[in-house]
Amino acid sequence: MKSICFYFQVHQPFRLKTYRFFEIGNDHNYFDEYANRYMIRQLAEKCYLPANQILLDLIKKHKKDFRVAFSISGMAIEQFEMYAPEVLDSFKKLAKTGQVEFLAETYNHGLSSLKSKKEFSRQVKMHETKIQSLFGVKPGAFRNTELIYNDDISKLVFGLGYNTILTEGPKHILGWKSPNLLYCSAANPKVKLLMKNFQMSDDIAFKFSVKEWSEWPLTAEKYAGWLKALDPKTEVVNLFMDYETFGQNQSQKSGIFDFLLNLPKEVLKNSDFTFQTPSQVSRNLQPASPLHVPYPISWADEERDITAWLGNEMQNEAFNKLFDLEPLVAKCNDDKILNDWNRLQTSDHFYYMSTKWFSEGVVKTRISPYNSPYDAFINYMNVLVDFEIRVKKYCSQKKSRSSANRAENAKPGSGTIAETSTKTAGKKTPAKGKKS
């Protein structure tokens, strides 16, 4: 049987508030609670709750013939807990069906895989623990932030216990090869790769409501026909997209929910495809060939590289300055500092600084809260300066407390080696030649 692998990304950043220069050193609350609450509540009503209900109904109807996968960032989970707990409850209902796979990723939806092995490992383990505690299952496959992948990342991920990775299927990597097969990493053949079919994914995620598109309107029956017409050697079609496609990016009026509701029926009726999760595909198929990916790839733009996040001097300056603080943050045992550290790493902050939006042919999929990339940079750097002050102050105070404790413990009578020596010296010892 040929497989359709549906994976949906669920992520929302903690958006920064307008943070001015004169607030540095005075205001340590960086995030716009109103904007974050408003966005999560809006998405809950427009997307998450209705889409989750449709998926639950589809699973009840088609049983084991229909499966999907989710990757839910820790940033999204935290905001569900704060602002929309009913959304988490709806995901838990899906988890109980046993037909939904929850993927591993970086907890903070950050770019640490490009900078710090230690921080990357910490974030993945943190996310893994959160998913297990919420849904009672350990993730079996891995999807990195923004589908970023290269040979080095495959080694990191395998070292963390995952042998299945979801990533983009760019033409400059695949060449003449089809994305509709399972591959493996050239750096470690034990790591299997599911490559996104970006054309068929984007037809749903980006083109669905575009009336100028030659294939508009896109119906479930038409889409099932496209699947049926694929090369007979096709083994799996990986449809990867943001979950916000349903109800937010593509509004309910566009018919996107009807499309989602009817697609499984049309596929199962009119083709030899079935629906499987990434882990199932990885277990059931043999890799067609190894893929060598020396430089990082992602889902973004025509280049499918990382320049949407780290493509200009502003982005790189902010990113490098943030990770310069990693050794100091590692010494901090302050929940507020660690929470801010997680949230400031989120890739969206760097995406908002991208100047690629001004070039033609670049798909701008995430609406920036800033008037320009330069405003995004200035705002972020103001926050980062204050965060740096806090981290250095904490470490300095911790060092001072440690020095004071050592000095106190060094005093006689303080329960240290000096005290023990004094007590021992004061004991009477048996006289020579006498039995003790």
Image (cartoon, grey):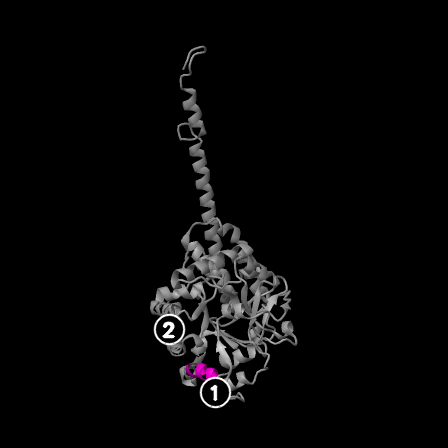
Name, please, the residue furthest toward the right: 176
| Residue 275 in view | yes
Question: Percent from the top left, x then y, of residue 220?
Answer: 46, 85
Q: Secondary structure at mark 2?
A: helix
Locate the C terminus and report the quarter of the image it occupies: top left
Label disc, if present, on residue 180 of the rendered structure: none
Q: CA distance from mark 2 to mark 1?
A: 28 Å
Question: Percent from the top left, x then y, of residue 394?
Answer: 45, 48
Q: Nearer the viewer, residue 260 or 162?
A: 162
Which residue in the protein does label 1 denote? 221
Q: Nearer the viewer, residue 405 or 29?
A: 405
Mark 2, Cα crowd under 10 Å, few <14 / some 14-19 / many 20+, is: many
Q: Earlier in the sequence, mark 2 or mark 1?
A: 2
Name, please, the residue furthest toward the top: 433
In the displayed structure image, the side of residue 206 where residue 81 appears, left or right: left
Q: Quadrant of residue 299?
A: bottom right
Name, please, the residue furthest toward the left: 86
* Labels 2, 1: front one: 1
Question: Percent from the top left, x then y, of residue 139?
Answer: 46, 63
Which residue in the protein does label 2 denote? 44
Q: Secondary structure at mark 1?
A: helix
**Would residue 126 be counted in the magenta stretch?**
no
Q: Nearer the viewer, residue 403 or 240?
A: 240
Name which residue type carries label 1. Glu
Question: Percent from the top left, x then y, of residue 415?
Answer: 40, 31
Give the prevailing secondary structure in the magenta stretch: helix
In the displayed structure image, the side of residue 309 where residue 46 appears, left or right: left
| Residue 30 in view | no
Mark 1, Cα crowd under 10 Å, few <14 / some 14-19 / many 20+, is: some
> What is the magenta range?
261-269
Indicate whether 388 appears above or below 209. Answer: above
